[in-house]
Amino acid sequence: MALATILSRAQNGLQADLVRVEVHLAPGLPGLSIVGLPEAAVREARDRVRAAIVNSGYQFPMRRITVNLAPADLPKEGGRFDLPIALGVLAASGQVPAEPLACLEVIGELSLSGEVRPVAGALPAALRCAEAGHELLVPLANAAEAQLARTATVRVARHVSELGARLHQGLPEPAPPRASAPAAAMPAADLAEVRGQPQAKRALEIAAAGGHSLLMIGPPGAGKSMLAQRLPGLLPPLTEDEAIEVAAIASLAPGGFRIEHWGMRPFRSPHHTASGVALVGGGTSPRPGEITLAHAGVLFLDELPEFDRRVLEVLREPLESGRITISRAARQVDFPAAFQLVAAMNPCPCGYLGDAAGRCRCTPDQIARYRSRLSGPLLDRVDLQAFVPRVERVALTAPADPQAQSSAEVRERVIAARRRQLARQGRSNAGLGPRELESHCRLDAGGRALLDAAITRLNLSARAYHRVLKVARTIADLAAHASVDGAALAEALRYRELERGAL
């Protein structure tokens, strides 16, 4: 046989598009050429494949070898095509049988010795492979990740020589027995460790219960970062579909997915020097950014005004839609980005506005310029704005309060509130649309009068008005109230600190 076709998968966001690796041997000057829009790492595969085949005890054909990666208009990148190209060369030259490879998709990078090395994106490939009804051959190091796709049949490769021997016997080695996914561990950080801050803790609970975004404003050292780090421990557990999606996204990141992180909500905290591409994703070959890596989890932006304003503005659309589409001349990639935003900032440039010791020397003009780094449209998309005051010395030095509520206790209330929301509307309150708000957040006459007065006094936009209603609905859910009463609405209005001019 002078022609062989091996099935593989390209890394194209979470899509993992099917690629046919066609290998043709023809008379002519010996050489190997790769066509089909390969990037540099794919073009370099010819040297890795040649050395791997020779060092595995096979003959590298001294013929003109053409490798076509179809479809030709789909960019191909990385070392994931090394193994399918090597198998195509061996099958086309008759050194391994082609029949076992007919319904087998193959990904894997090769060392010069013939060892099969892991690649990124094994889980998305396994999910798409299972949908197509094919089996998947992966490096041994990728087996546990690929088996998270419950319906996928996974086989493993350790070395080209061992794989060739297996193919002569029938099929490659099956993956080790699928171990049950580990139970998701609770984050070690506990809410009970935060001294004082009852109002901020309450805001954190409301944010967790309704999936709301939160901005904490307070002086340095008040505990804003500590509170944000404890939010994942308050959130409900991921469903299996959510856990698989989170794992698939993590598998595309440089560090890859670690099985011990299964079922844990992500917590991402990029530095304020991060670029727009780092935050939302992009590049010549689109990669997920921080907002996608935080999908179904928490994105924490500390020192929010220190971020470049243009960088912050790119968050506006994903906060509304829960997705981000990255368009390039060659392709377009869609990533999920349903993250929960938590941000922190100081009340003024020095951070000590209103300090009893009189440390703040910021002028009103400096304070106004500092806060103007955050645009109105961005602040409109933040549901809760909570002040985090300086912790008093008595609360800081006193022994730990044994009655302080732990993350587990608060989490139980959050889960109960989320269940009410799912039973009522099928989603969290943060995702309610205008029509659903009219149905599920109806106010009595007193509540309507209070909200009308607040709109006039605080000059709330239509978006801010809807956010207040969503927060009030969540507060009512935490109290197990069927309707939104005046107390829930009044508390929701207190979490508009910047509009109220309370700072």
Image: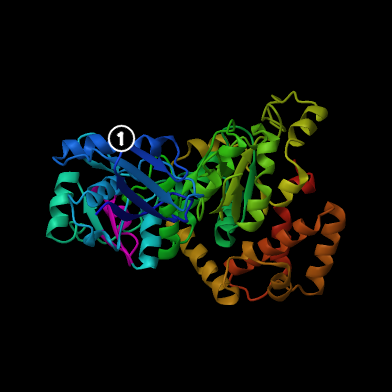
Q: Please check the rendered image and state whether residue 149 is part of the magenta-colored stretch, yes or no.
A: yes
Q: Which residue is mark 1?
A: 29
394 to the left or right of 438: left
Q: Is residue 374 above or below residue 162?
A: above
The residue lying toward the viewer, choosing from 418 and 16, is 16
Mark 1 neighbour class, 10 Å CA radius: few under 14, some 14 to 19, many 20 or more: few
Tell me the quarter of the picture where residue 177 sits: bottom left
Left or right of 226? Residue 126 is left
Which of these two is toward me, 301 or 226?
301
Extent of the magenta region: 134-154
Residue 439 coordinates in the image, percent (x, y): 71, 76
Any magenta on residue 161?
no
| Whether residue 374 is visible | yes
Q: Residue 119, how many percent across, how many down?
A: 34, 44
* Residue at 37 percent of width and 55 percent of height: 123
In-front residue for pair 106/225:
106
The quadrant in which the C terminus is found is top right
Foreground residue among 26 and 158: 26
Residue occupying the point 70% across, 28% down: 349
Q: Relative to residue 237, is residue 331 depicted above or below?
A: above
Rendered-image quadrant of the N terminus: bottom left
Q: Residue at (35%, 52%) from the top-left corner?
A: 22
What sort of colour scheme is used for the picture? rainbow
Q: Amino acid at mark 1?
A: Leu
Q: Residue 17: x, y in percent?
A: 45, 56
Residue 386 located left or right of residue 20: right
Helix, strand or loop at mark 1: loop
Q: Is residue 195 visible?
A: no
Residue displayed at 53% across by 49% down: 292
Q: Position of residue 306 (x, y in %)?
A: 65, 32
